[in-house]
């Protein structure tokens, strides 16, 4: 099975120039805690609800005046939609992340692969157990 077979295609993003309130509202509406950060059509990082709480509010920043760029994580982990699921799962294990961005040949965002996606579709209980053990630690 390939990543493109199970990935989430309708991925909500946030601009690097947006403020914390915009990102938090997007997360609340969709009941999610993770957004890819985009600028000029490309992904430049990711922001989580934890980033907003700890790097934003926890550091005393003013939510309406703080941009996502200021608190985002600039490192992204990704795979391609034609990658085999076991390879993507190994990437998650090695990088200890719960989500991989799915990029196309021109490195444009086309989807998101999460541990939940893997849990719902992978037949290898052993591999999934390894991934969950390393990522959840």
Image (cartoon, rainbow, N blue to C red):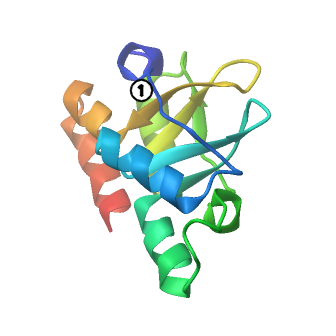
Q: Which residue lies under the disc numbered 1? A: 85
Q: Foreground: 29 or 86?
A: 29
Q: Foreground: 47 or 3?
A: 47
Residue 103 at x, y percent in the picture:
63, 26
Split into 4 quadrants, where in the image is the N terminus? top left
Q: Foreground: 132 or 39?
A: 39
Q: Which residue, as the protein is rendered here, is positioned at the far front?
A: 64
Let me know if residue 98 appears in the view: no
Q: Is residue 122 left or right of residue 93?
A: left
Split into 4 quadrants, where in the image is the C terminus? bottom left
In the image, residue 99 sits, relative to residue 123, either above or below, namely: below
Residue 94 at x, y percent in the picture:
51, 53
Q: Quadrant of residue 104?
A: top right
Few, some or many C-alpha atoms within 10 Å of disc 1 (few <14, some 14-19, many ≥20)?
many
Residue name at image x 42 percent, y 26 percent:
85
Residue name at image x 54 percent, y 86 percent:
60
Q: Quadrant of residue 9?
A: top left
Residue name at image x 46 percent, y 16 percent:
4
Residue 22 at x, y percent in the picture:
52, 51
In the image, residue 133 sits, relative to residue 14, either above or below, namely: below
Q: Is residue 52 left or right of residue 71?
A: left
In the image, residue 14 sits, relative to residue 22, either above or below, namely: above
């Amino acid at each position: 099975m390939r990543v493109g077979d199970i990935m989430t295609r309708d991925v909500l993003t946030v601009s690097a120039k947006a403020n914390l309130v915009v990102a938090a509202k997007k997360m609340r509406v969709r009941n999610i805690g993770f957004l890819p950060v985009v600028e000029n059509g490309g992904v430049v990082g990711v922001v989580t609800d934890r980033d907003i709480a700890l790097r934003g509010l926890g550091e005393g920043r003013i939510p309406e005046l703080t941009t996502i760029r200021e608190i985002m994580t600039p490192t992204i982990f990704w795979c391609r939609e034609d990658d085999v699921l076991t390879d993507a799962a190994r990437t998650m294990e090695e990088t200890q992340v719960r989500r991989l961005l799915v990029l196309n040949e021109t490195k444009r965002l086309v989807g998101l692969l999460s541990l939940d996606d893997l849990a719902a579709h992978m037949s290898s209980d052993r591999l999934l157990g390894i991934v969950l053990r390393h990522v959840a630690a």
